[in-house]
Image (cartoon, rainbow, N blue to C red):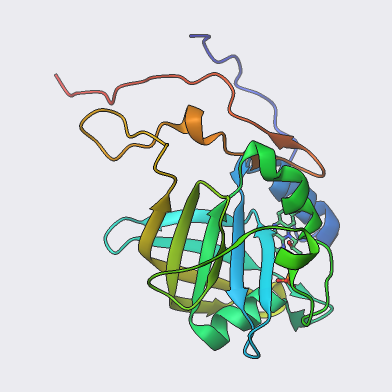
Amino acid sequence: MKKASGPFEHRIIDTDEVSGLDRYQLLTSLVVPRPIGWVSTYAIDGVLNLAPFSFFSAVAASPMLISVSIGNRMGHPKDSLRNILDQKAFCVNIVTEVQVAQMNETSADFSPDQDEFERTDLPVGIADKVNAPYVANCPAVFECALFKEVDLGDAGGLVLGEVKAVRLNSDIQFKEGSCLVDTTELRPVARLGGPEYTLLGDILVIPRPTIK
Ligand SMILES: Cc1cc2nc3c(=O)[nH]c(=O)nc-3n(C[C@H](O)[C@H](O)[C@H](O)COP(=O)(O)O)c2cc1C
């Protein structure tokens, strides 16, 4: 493995001195690659909703928690946040290589009465454990119950979901003697800055160190 060079002379960017767009671009091109949580929900009137979020992360294993940060649109909560707070439930579908175009389409500003599943011709499944739809041709889906919402003020809301069930395409194998999914079979897509995305690159296998 290559050794690090440096130390470097760093340019300091004072985040209070730059625009909101600059902060967004710095954040989203440095926190990379980000997995994409494709969030599916029901509106209170039953309309299905689907949108991608890359401010998405694993939070804890027991209880099994994930987080999604949902910004405001024109000062109002996006449909996904409103639906999650109303239904206390959502699914997170893991976006794979073959779904990238449809995922991108679902990020358009559809009005709340428009069903993104229908608009993008995606098959709908009904979650077993929570009141939410899911993308039936996604190989991996988390069925989540709302665990907590953190109000982020102008930045929208951070939702923590407790994963009540994991749905996995039965063709996807676990690594022997474990529940580790073979990620090369999953073929997840991750987001970089701006319009850039990435697939899995080289996989490094690095066992944890032991203290001698
Ligand atoms: C790959 C990708 C990642 C995105 N990540 C986020 C995000 O983390 N937070 C956010 O508020 N919007 C994000 N967006 C924009 C939302 O998907 C978009 O605002 C969408 O229309 C929200 O839909 P909704 O109103 O149905 O919730 C992302 C868009 C794309 C294409």
Question: Does 11 appear above or below 134?
Answer: above
Vertical position of residue 39 compared to residue 146: above or below: above
Tell me if 165 is positioned left or right of 189 in this view: left
- Residue toward you, 162 or 76: 162
Residue 175 image offset from top left, x and y in percent: 31, 29
Q: Is residue 18 among what the camera can see?
A: no
In the picture, which quadrant includes the C terminus?
A: top left
Question: Relative to residue 59, is residue 207 depicted above or below?
Answer: above
Q: Residue at x 72, y 44 (%)?
A: 100
Q: In the image, 200: left or right of 162?
A: right
Could you tell me which residue is drawn at 77 percent across and 46 percent down? Answer: 101
Tally the marks.
Answer: 0
- Residue at position x 44%, y 77% in the image: 148
Q: Quadrant of ligand 1?
A: bottom right
Of residues 137 and 95, the one drawn nearer to the viewer in this rendering: 137
Residue 72 seen: yes
From the viewer's side, name the closer residue of 22 and 107: 107
Q: Residue at x 39, y 43 (%)?
A: 170
User: In x, y percent, where is residue 46?
Assistant: 63, 85
**In the image: residue 190, left or right of residue 11:** left
The image shows residue 102 at horizontal and vertical percentages of 75, 51
Q: Quadrant of residue 155?
A: bottom right
| Residue 85 at x, y percent in the picture | 55, 84
Q: Nearer the viewer, residue 10 or 39?
A: 39
